[in-house]
Amino acid sequence: MAIRPARAGARYTQAVRSHQWIDERSLALHTAVASKLEARPELLDVARQNLRRWLSTSAAGALQEWQDVLDRAPLSDVIGLLRSDSADAARLRQSSPFAGVLSPHERRSILDAYESRRA
């Protein structure tokens, strides 16, 4: 299924992705983040800095939840949350503060792998 542009003559289409496909792709990205955190725990500071910046302009509930997790949970619990397939973990990953932990190449490799498995 594809979304067609409303404007006549436009040349693009965009595939519609299922929620499950999006959640699985997000889990794959965050599993890669978890692996990097295991090797380099100091990368948790990237998430902390993102949260500080984002919370200064928004009080979104999920951001505050992440702040609480990063302030209180040991690294092993954070890694477990990133790899969890629970509904709460999937919800939190939608507001992930881990932007910048994966290199552009690492991120692109995962996105390309999921793009080849269109759902």
Image: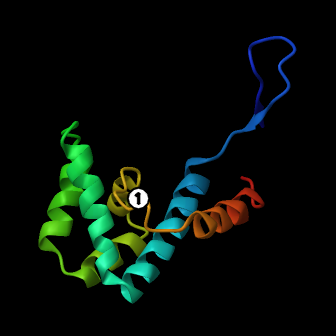
Colour pattern of the rendering: rainbow
Q: Is residue 113 above or below residue 7?
A: below
Q: Is residue 4 above or below residue 64?
A: above
The image quadrant that residue 117 belongs to is bottom right
* Towards the viewer: 80 or 33: 33
Q: Is residue 82 left or right of residue 29?
A: left
* Count of numbered circles in the view: 1
- Give the residue drawn at x 65%, y 62%: 108
Circle 1 residues within 10 Å: few <14, some 14–19, many ≥20: many
Q: Is residue 110 left or right of residue 68?
A: right
- Indicate the secondary structure of the residue bearing disc 1: helix
Residue 34: give x, y in percent of width and height.
Answer: 41, 77
The image quadrant that residue 44 belongs to is bottom left
- Give the residue drawn at x 20%, y 45%: 55
* Towards the viewer: 103 or 109: 103
Query: Where does the N terminus fall, quadrant-wise?
Result: top right
The amino acid marked with disc number 1 is: Ala
Give the farthest residue toward the left: 72
Give the farthest residue toward the top: 8
- Give the residue drawn at x 37%, y 59%: 87
Q: Is residue 37 left or right of residue 63?
A: right
Q: Is residue 67 above or below residue 28?
A: above
Q: What residue does disc 1 label?
A: 90
- Give the residue drawn at x 83%, y 19%: 10
Residue 5: give x, y in percent of width and height.
Answer: 75, 20
Residue 111: give x, y in percent of width and height.
Answer: 65, 60
